[in-house]
């Protein structure tokens, strides 16, 4: 009887071990599952070092022009640590100084121009935010600081062209003359319309004429009239609210007549027709609190814009999604400071060759390039996309 008990006990333990191994194998299989997707590798040698002992502050925008030149915007001294970085205290040693707010790199990663900051005829934002280039290679920026209720437009060389909206206007998501701490501007160049993710104060998408800045239309979550009500922090266990939370962080139009909106703190992407009619939504990493998961969107450069690339600055990764179904195909990146890792990946853009560029805010403070390597088999969860040996 005792021997039978030992045998049964051994069998039970063995079964539990086998079950545990099988469960681990299933989990491993889910992580290592191979899928067909665009493949990327981080380029640890891009961009090239900055001159003049320049360093970046929180880097909160990236855009690409018609020549595949990459533009970034950062916050400089206000986000540099006074003890370990420049910090606005002036040069007290050989290193370091804050770079100018806007930097331009050629495709090889060389710095070819730099400019930005206060000037005649316009109000430089108290906290610049986002940088985008239209089809004429004009540079547009917003601001998410107090009093940043306007948009600025420059040539690619920094010549001031226009200011839309007056600075220091109150938050008002129904205003037709001003904005409310704009996160980013995107374009439907054929329609001559700019889509404003408006933003950190207002809770709406606004569409303006690219020449005059005149307000053409605006909408809130689900295409409804926007409200300025503070709904409190996001609770993943509560029903989704019918309002954007701040910030509305991107509004990206597509070639097939849709607009994809980053409702960042609600962990969701909402899709609209260009007239503001709601189409559908999806949540990404819906348990994410705080800063949220849906930070910025870029599209693949094929004519159908088949893939959507979503920057998630809280979970430190980039999702590769099927744009039509909004399903996640694969993801890459991880938290950290090495190439291919992220700390608050904030903004994302693509060039004509399909390469991805990202910038990082908070203490990330950098620009990275992920080289497109064509379609192929990759893990569903890739981690750091380190270059393969060739």
Image: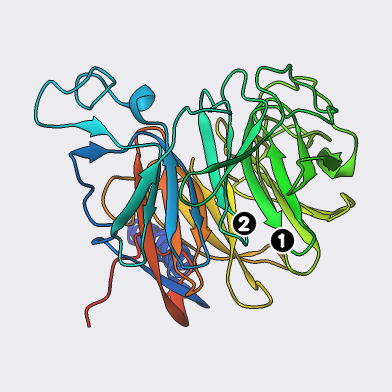
Q: Position of residue 211 (x, y in %)?
A: 74, 48
Question: 10 Å neighbourhood of mark 2: few (<14), some, or many (≥20)?
Answer: many
Q: Secondary structure at mark 2?
A: loop
> Of the numbered discs in the image, which one, if any, rests on residue 321?
none
- Residue 192 vs 107, above or below: the answer is above
Horizontal arrangement in the rendering, residue 243 relative to residue 93 (left or right): right
Residue occupying the far left of the picture: 94
Q: Nearer the viewer, residue 263 or 84?
A: 84
Q: Residue at x 72, y 63 (%)?
A: 254
Question: 10 Å neighbourhood of mark 1: few (<14), some, or many (≥20)?
Answer: few
Q: Position of residue 38 (x, y in %)?
A: 50, 75
Q: Is residue 1 visible?
A: no
- Quarter occupied by the C terminus: bottom left
Q: Position of residue 269 (x, y in %)?
A: 70, 49
Horizontal arrangement in the rendering, residue 81 relative to residue 203 (left or right): left
- Quarter occupied by the N terminus: bottom left
Which residue is the site of mark 2?
A: 134
Which residue is the site of mark 1?
A: 189
């Amino acid at each position: 009887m005792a021997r039978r008990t030992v045998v049964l006990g051994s069998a039970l333990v063995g079964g539990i071990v086998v079950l545990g191994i099988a469960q681990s194998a299933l989990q491993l299989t889910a992580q290592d599952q191979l899928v067909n997707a665009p493949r990327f590798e981080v380029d640890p040698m891009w961009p090239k070092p900055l001159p003049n002992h320049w360093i970046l502050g929180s880097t909160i925008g990236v855009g690409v022009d018609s020549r595949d030149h990459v533009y970034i915007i950062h916050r400089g001294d206000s986000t540099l640590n006074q003890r370990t970085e420049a910090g606005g205290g002036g040069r007290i040693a050989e290193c370091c100084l804050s770079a100018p707010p806007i930097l331009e790199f050629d495709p090889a990663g060389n710095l070819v121009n730099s400019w930005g900051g206060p000037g005649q005829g316009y109000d430089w934002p108290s906290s610049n935010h986002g940088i985008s280039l239209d089809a004429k290679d004009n540079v547009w920026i917003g601001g998410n600081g107090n009093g940043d209720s306007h948009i600025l437009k420059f040539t690619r060389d920094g010549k001031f062209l226009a200011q839309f909206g007056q600075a220091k206007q109150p938050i008002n998501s129904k205003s037709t003359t001003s904005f409310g701490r704009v996160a980013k501007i995107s374009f439907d160049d054929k329609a001559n319309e700019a889509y404003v993710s408006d933003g950190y104060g207002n809770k709406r998408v606004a569409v303006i004429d690219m020449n005059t800045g005149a307000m053409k239309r605006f909408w809130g979550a689900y295409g409804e009239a926007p409200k300025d009500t503070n709904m409190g922090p996001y609770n993943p266990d509560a029903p989704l609210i019918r309002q954007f939370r701040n910030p509305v962080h991107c509004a990206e139009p597509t070639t097939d007549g849709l607009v994809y909106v980053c409702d960042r703190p609600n962990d969701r992407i909402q899709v609209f027709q260009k007239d503001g009619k709601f189409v559908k939504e999806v949540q990404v990493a819906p348990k994410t609190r705080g800063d949220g998961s849906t930070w910025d969107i870029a599209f693949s450069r094929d004519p159908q814009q088949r893939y959507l690339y979503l920057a998630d600055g809280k979970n430190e990764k980039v999702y590769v999604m099927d744009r039509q179904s909004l399903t996640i195909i694969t993801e890459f990146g991880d938290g950290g400071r090495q190439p291919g890792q992220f700390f608050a990946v904030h903004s994302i853009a693509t060039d004509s060759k399909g390469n991805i560029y990202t910038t990082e805010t908070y203490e990330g403070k950098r620009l990275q390039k992920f080289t497109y390597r064509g379609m192929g088999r990759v893990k569903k969860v890739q981690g750091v996309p380190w270059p393969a040996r060739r």
